[in-house]
Amino acid sequence: MNITKMHGIGNDYVYVNCIKNQIEDPSSLAVTISDRHFGVGSDGLILIKSSEKADFMMDMYNADGSRGMMCGNGIRCVGKYVYDHGLTDKKIITIETLSGVKTLNLSIKPVGEVDGYQSISNNGYVVSAVTVNMGAPIFEPEEVPLKLSEGFAARKLSSIIDINPIKDMGIIPDEKVAIRMPLVINDAFYYGTAVSMGNPHFVVFVDNTDTFPVEKEGPLFENNRLFPERVNTEFVQVIDRTHVKMRVWERGSGETMACGTGACATVVACILNNKTEDEVTVSLLGGDLKIKWDREENTVFMTGPATTVFEGEI
């Protein structure tokens, strides 16, 4: 089986062209191939398939074999894959995901102007970066989803559901948002904002991301009973109104170098909490992403690089 290892600022996946050949058990393959000691090593497996709704379909599996809804860094690499491998010549493409169809705008450069490994090119050109229309953020707790009938949340419901920030900003005035939601982890109080970008996120502001114990606290957020489908948790340090730092604990993968949907959820949460402007640089362990929330259109845009690590056969 031919594979391509790719990453979006360190969030790495193994990619397989399944347009003609199907994989019978992708969940088991994801576990095997993601193992960093006995496999290829990755945050998961992404299969590129044909689609009746879009130009292509992205079918993704996390390192633990669970199926993922959407991955911002992963979908940028899908755009690079299909263009660099000559599956399309279009600069604007659509990708079907389990969280809807996403539109990608591909930035193309001559192969000699792009750093890193480039064994394959489309007539001498490759994708260097991708801007993704990530769609509208989802706030309704039941759709994130949050299970608000449980424990502490039920007793403190009035402090959890706060629609005033949304009303004041003129964004979806009839929708509720779980903002500054209290959560007890290891006898410590955390306050987070719940946002879905096609997958669930809980954004928590901390004083220093460098020293925060992500590996210790992350699993406790992920598996908290308030999140019936588990949750991706972003730990965010605000540098200034246009720059934040973020570390992420991803459900099914643990701490990763980057998370595109998490960066989008982070900027949305920053704006809701009046911590940043609408365009923000998000610095992750693997590099930077540019995120913009167009509040008039209620659409989030993500721009970042896509990189090929190697082509191989397994």
Image (cartoon, helix red, strand yellow):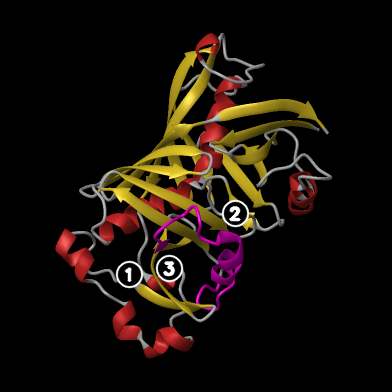
* Mark number displayed over residue 255: 2
| Front: mark 2 or 1 | 2
9 displayed left or right of 42: left
**Nearest to N terminus: mark 2 or mark 1:** 1
Residue 158 placement: quadrant: bottom left
Instruction: Return the x and y of residue 216 as percentages of the image width and height.
Output: 60, 66
Range drawn in magenta: 204-228
**Nearest to N terminus: mark 1 or mark 3:** 3
Count of picture labels = 3
205 displayed left or right of 2: left
**Amino acid type, mark 3:** Glu
Q: Which residue is mark 3?
A: 143
Instruction: Return the x and y of residue 207 as percentages of the image width and height.
Output: 39, 60
Q: Which residue is mark 1?
A: 179
Look at 51% across and 81% down and name the residue there.
Answer: 187
* Mark number displayed over residue 47: none
Up/down of 108 relative to 135, above or below:
above
Q: Secondary structure at mark 2?
A: strand
Q: Nearer the viewer, residue 70 or 22?
A: 70
The CA span between labels 3 and 2 is 24 Å
**Nearest to N terminus: mark 3 or mark 2:** 3
**Amino acid type, mark 2:** Glu
Residue 213 in magenta stretch: yes
Look at 17% across and 59% down and name the residue there.
Answer: 169
